[in-house]
Structures are given as C-alpha cells and as structure tokens.
Amino acid sequence: MIETSRNGQRGREDSVAVVGAGIIGLSIAWHLNKRGIPVVIYDPNEPGSGCSSGNAGAISPGSVVPLAMTGLLASVPGMLLNPAGALHIPMRYWLTAFPWLARFVSHARPSQVRVISKALADLYAPAIDHHHQLLTEIGAIDLMRKSGQLYLYRDERQLQDSERDWKLRASHGVAFDILKRGEIEELEPQVGQAYQIGVFLPNAAMSVNPQRQALAIAQALVSSGAELVRERVLGFEHSGQTITGVRTDQGSHPHRATVVAAGAWSASLLRTLGYRVPLEAQRGYHVDFKDAGISLSRPIIPADRKVFITPMETGLRVAGTVEIAGLNAAPSEARAKLLYEDLRAALPSVRTEQPDPFWMGHRPCLPDSLPVIGPTEKWAGLFSAFGHGHLGLTASAATGDLVGRMISGEPVPINVAPFRIERF
C-alpha cells in the first residue's frame, strides 16, 4: 500500500490536481512532477487498482486499427446471439447501449477509419520509447520486456478475414512477419497444432506486472514530493469560466489546473460542467494461473478467440471478452470462465485446475476508438485524459508526456485535434 503523503499541496493554488490514480493519471502526474509542477492525485482507491492492474500487460504501438471496422461489424450480430461470444450485452442493457452502438457503427466508414487510425498511430508510435524513459527515471525498467507479440490464425482463410487490418497497420509503418507453423514453434513451441499461421510483431512490448508498474510510479511520485489523496472528487470549483479547484467528499481544494483522468467515471464527473461525452464501460475479465505448466516468452493472441495470453509475474494471464453492461452490474463468473476455453484452445497442455479469483474491470471506451486528451475550450484550467479503451497501458506514458507539455506550455509533437473533447 502506498502511503499518502502530507505536503500540504492541496492548499497551494500553484498545484495541479489529477483526478484518478490509474496508469494514465499516474503517468500525467509524473510528467508534471518532473517539470517542477506540484501535483496532487485524488482517488479513493489504491493507485492502479482498476484496469491499470487488470489489463493484458501488452504495450502495443501497432494497435492502430479502430474497433469499428467493417469486418468486425459483420461478425457482431453472431457474437451477440452467442451466449459464449466475445461480445455480450445483457438484454436489460440493450436500450441503454443502443445510442452508443449506433455512434460506434457510424465510425466504420472508410473515410473515418483513415482519420482515426492516423491519430492512433501518432499517439501509439512512440509508446515504447516513452515507457522506457519513464521506467528508467523511476528505476523500474525491469517491468518492461521488449518481447514482441504473436497473433495466431488457424488457416489462410482466417488470416484473409483480417487482411484489411494488417494492410492498415502496414500503411502506418507497423512491422510484422507472417510465420508458418514451424516458425511459430520456434517462438512458442506449446501453441496448439490448430494454429498453422502466425503474425509476429517484433516491435511490441509487455509489462511483466501492470499492478507493480502502477505502484512503482505512485511510489516514485510520493518520494518526489507529489501527494496522493484518498478522497473522491465530486465536482469542481470555478470562478466564471475558469476551474479553480476540486470539490471532494472531504471538502474543496484550490488548484491552478485540474486533469480529469478518472477512466470510466470521467463522463459522469464532467457532466457537472455541461459535457455529454458518450463514454461506455466495456467490462473486461482476466484470470491468472500460477501453476499453468506453460512457458511463453511473449503475449500470444489467438485471433478467433479475441483474447490475450500473457506470461506475467503473477502467472499466465488470459484476458479478454467485451461485456457492455454499465458500471453497476455485478461481475459474471460465467463470462470469466469462458476464458478457460480460450486458453485451452491456444495452449492445449495448459493446467487450469488452480486459477486465481477472476478479475473484472471497466475499460472506458468512446465510439470513435479515440481517447479524449487535452484542454477544454469552455473551461480554462480544465484538462482531460480518458477513454483509452483497451489500450490505456500502451498509451499511458505518451499521454502523460502530452498533458505535461500542454500544462507547462511546451509544444506538443503530434496533432492533438482529433482528441478534443469538443468533437462530441
């Protein structure tokens, strides 16, 4: 557990409030702190205890394909009708989810895909360099492994179904090699014989322990003078159209600027300022197996199962599924157990008798697959960084650098217009 520091910065009007102690908020806080800007991080929970610890651990600069693609959309009805499908929306949530789904589908047009993928490529391309720099600065470079990623396909037909995705990646300079069965075995000999074709991305990386990574950043922040405050932000203080601080369950605190990085809870918080951001929580699950009897060197992704399987310090992790059911529904053990079959399909010799308790978290997703990053036009002193979907870990260090530059008045290296909150 990270000790809450007591530096009194909550009473300093030159400090910046970061709302949310997930990997995005922590990375932003680090980039502000290293620039000499006093930082206060607000979160009622332990740093990195949400999706920042529950993800697949992949650092994927090649993830430039929007979720809304024509090929994926064609398979959505089948997934929804299949109780064991990778996408699930409970009947009770259909009416609530429909407006978001309609907007999601609208972004599958080729013209939209080109614009979105360019923005994603700009954001993700330097991801590994940013992670390397941040982890080196806090003395935790051992947390990142430049292992590459291996996608798995059963046959040529299945690979051809993804041809559009790979062409889009190639157009943005993403390097990959198509492997035959023997080459798969050279990399990962325990992959099941059902998978005859692989696509290897050599320039991807992974975190060996996402929770330890978040905690390492949090500890470095506290040691460097930042303050972690276990209070829940309920709203904002303002003077005219300028945000002057935050209002928590314990009182009001003045700040020179405020960054909303509260993940799936960001939209409800910003609603108090008049924003209507179509943020949906895509609930994801993972299970860790400490005694799996499997030795992997990198994340593998069986394309037909739509899961990541990653070797971590905590065991062999299988992570995936998309469940759109809101923030308040109870976790589904049945959904978590689907991951067992996904794991066995890719690694038939795996042992699944002694899993850790399953995990479920809320991935904050926007219908155009782009996060919100940057200042707002309506409110001076207000910045946002949320909605990174399934790629929060990948984008965290780069997002931290962007927001740190914005608040300190430095030029930013990419076009951030596609990430404006005012696009909604």
Image: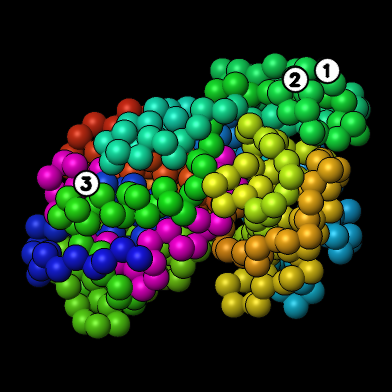
- Tell me what residue is drawn at x 35 percent, y 65 percent: 1
Q: What residue type is labelled 2?
A: Glu
Where does the magenta region start and end? 31-58
Q: Are marks 2 and 1 in contact (CB under 8 Å)?
A: yes
- Tell me what residue is drawn at x 73 percent, y 61 percent: 354
Instruction: Report the front residue among 256 and 420.
Output: 256
Q: What residue type is labelled 1?
A: Gly
Kindly indicate the quadrant of the structure image that contains residue 71. Answer: top right
Image x and y of residue 43, in percent: 34, 68
| Circle nearer the N terminus (2, 3) | 3
Q: Give the residue at mark 3.
A: 32
Q: Give the residue at mark 1.
A: 182
68 inside magenta stretch? no
Q: Dot 1 lies on which element? A: helix
Q: Dot 2 lies on which element? A: helix
Instruction: Report the front residue among 31 and 71.
Output: 31
Q: Which amino acid does label 3 sit on?
A: Leu
Which label was assigned to residue 186?
2
